[in-house]
Image: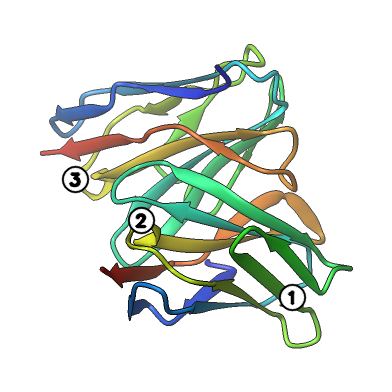
Amino acid sequence: EAQVTQNPRYLITVTGKKLTVTCSQNMNHEYMSWYRQDPGLGLRQIYYSMNVEVTDKGDVPEGYKVSRKEKRNFPLILESPSPNQTSLYFCASGASSYNEQFFGPGTRLTVL
Amino acid sequence: SQQGEEDPQALSIQEGENATMNCSYKTSINNLQWYRQNSGRGLVHLILIRSNEREKHSGRLRVTLDTSKKSSSLLITASRAADTASYFCATDLRYNNNDMRFGAGTRLTVKP
């Protein structure tokens, strides 16, 4: 089954404790991206990747890092999480940015 | 910054009625996409319309695009309770088409 998976689905952590949210797709997509969703603000793009070893900042990259060492994986790293990063995070993939995007189920992160 | 803005923010209708949602954007685009999100879940792609297209249909969905006004509309005909969800438009920027921008969404409630 074609899908985008994210782990964990729910995470409660404390300020400053490094964490990684994994994202994996099995559709051989070149384009992958991360979004955060906050009430009233819709989805805002954090980072995107056109292909392996190619990543670029989106709209709200501060406080986040990503890597794209393999085509299928695109982890989101919070080196020192802060409470303002409490949000719902989505990973997505597509053949390119102007094709249909497939979204993961979301990761609800709470930073205390 | 957000590229697309949906209007209205919320819409409540009776089952069987038509629902119209609008999206306006700021800069030239290659494509515009509409997505649906059930509460707290990942987004699901509905339809993609290219900048050289004016109208597109998919089942009960009709999308129009007016590039001169930088706006699009999504019409759902003969709505059902199961159509209750949030609807988002997404655009890729013509001069940086690896960067996708979503609006804040329209929350549609269809009452049985």
Assign the C terminus of chain B to one quadrant of the image: bottom left
Label total for image: 3
Name the residue tied to disc 2: B82
Residue type for callout 3: Pro
Alpha carbons under labels 1 and 3: distance apart: 39 Å
- Numbered circle sitting on residue A83: 3
Above or below, B107 relative to A33? below
Q: Return the chain for callout 2.
A: B
Task: Rate crowding at label 2 as few (under 14), some (14 to 19) or many (20 or more) other CA atoms within 10 Å.
Answer: few
Name the residue tied to disc 1: B65
Viewer-proximal residue, B57 or A83? Answer: B57
Residue in the image at 75% along x and 38% along y: A96
Residue type for callout 1: Leu
| Both marks 1 and 3 on one chain | no
Q: Secondary structure at mark 3?
A: helix
- Numbered circle sitting on residue B8: none
Report the residue that reaches farthest toward the top. A70
Mark nearest the camera among 2 and 3 is 2
Asked if the residue under mark 3 is in contact with the one under mark 1, i.e. CB atoms within 8 Å, the reply is no
Task: Rate crowding at label 3 as few (under 14), some (14 to 19) or many (20 or more) other CA atoms within 10 Å.
Answer: some
Asked if the residue under mark 3 is in contact with the one under mark 2, i.e. CB atoms within 8 Å, the reply is no
